[in-house]
């Protein structure tokens, strides 16, 4: 008898992979340092669902109370902040939640909070969808 293999493309969806990645970070934060760049590359994916999942995961990772990922991976953090301008309303809405979570959990990172406040301010002031503002 052979043991079943896990086919990530069929058995586990992108959302599941991102959920697993977040849980791994909670257990052992250093384990994700090699994949942060890979996740960040999906921030500009043409597939809206993949872009949304990557935006959500990075937002959770950056805002985790014990996380220093935003400081250690500043280019990825800046790429994530640019999702505040994403053409997809659902992603900008996700960013509002993620940005406010970041401000409440990472308040001691004043330089990062300044960038986050600026991104949040842009969405609130300029978003073309009133419900998002």
Image (cartoon, rainbow, N blue to C red):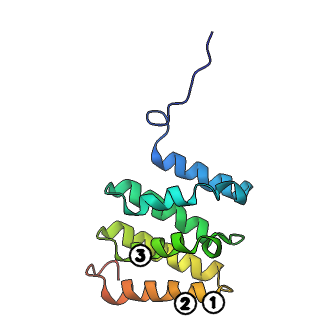
In the displayed structure, would residue 98 be above or below residue 124?
above
Q: Is residue 84 left or right of residue 111?
A: left
**In the image, what residue occupies the spot 44% across and 84% down?**
119
Cα distance in 3D space between marks 3 and 2: 14 Å
Residue wearing tag 1: 110
Give the left or right position of residue 109, taking residue 5 as reference: right
Where disc 2 sits, the SS reads helix
The quarter of the rendered structure image containing the N terminus is top right
Q: Residue furthest left?
A: 128
**Rendering quarter of residue 106:** bottom right
Which residue is denoted by mark 2 in the rendering?
114
At mark 1, the secondary structure is helix
Q: Which residue is mark 3?
A: 82
Instruction: Check whether the beta carbons of the residues at disc 2 and disc 1 lie within 8 A of each other.
Output: yes
Residue neighbourhood size for the residue with mark 1, other residues' Cα within 10 Å, grouped as few (<14), some (14–19), many (≥20):
few
Separation of marks 3 and 1 at Cα, in angstroms: 19 Å
**Location of residue 95 (image quadrant):** bottom left
Please identify the quadrant where the C terminus is shown.
bottom left
Question: Is 41 left, or right, of 31 in this rendering?
Answer: left
- CA distance separating discs 2 and 1: 6 Å
- Look at 46% across and 47% down and name the residue there: 14
């Amino acid at each position: 008898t052979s043991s079943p293999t896990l086919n990530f493309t069929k058995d586990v969806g992108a959302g599941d992979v991102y959920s697993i990645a977040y849980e791994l970070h909670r257990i052992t934060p250093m384990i994700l340092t090699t994949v942060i760049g890979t996740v960040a590359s999906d921030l500009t994916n043409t597939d809206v669902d993949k872009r949304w999942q990557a935006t959500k995961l990075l937002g959770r990772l950056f805002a985790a109370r014990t996380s220093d990922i935003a400081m250690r991976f500043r280019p990825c953090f800046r790429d994530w902040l640019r999702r505040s301008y994403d053409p997809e309303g659902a992603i900008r809405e996700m960013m509002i939640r993620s940005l406010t979570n970041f401000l409440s959990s990472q308040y001691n990172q004043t330089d990062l909070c300044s960038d986050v406040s600026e991104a949040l301010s842009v969405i609130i002031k300029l978003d073309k969808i009133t419900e998002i503002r």
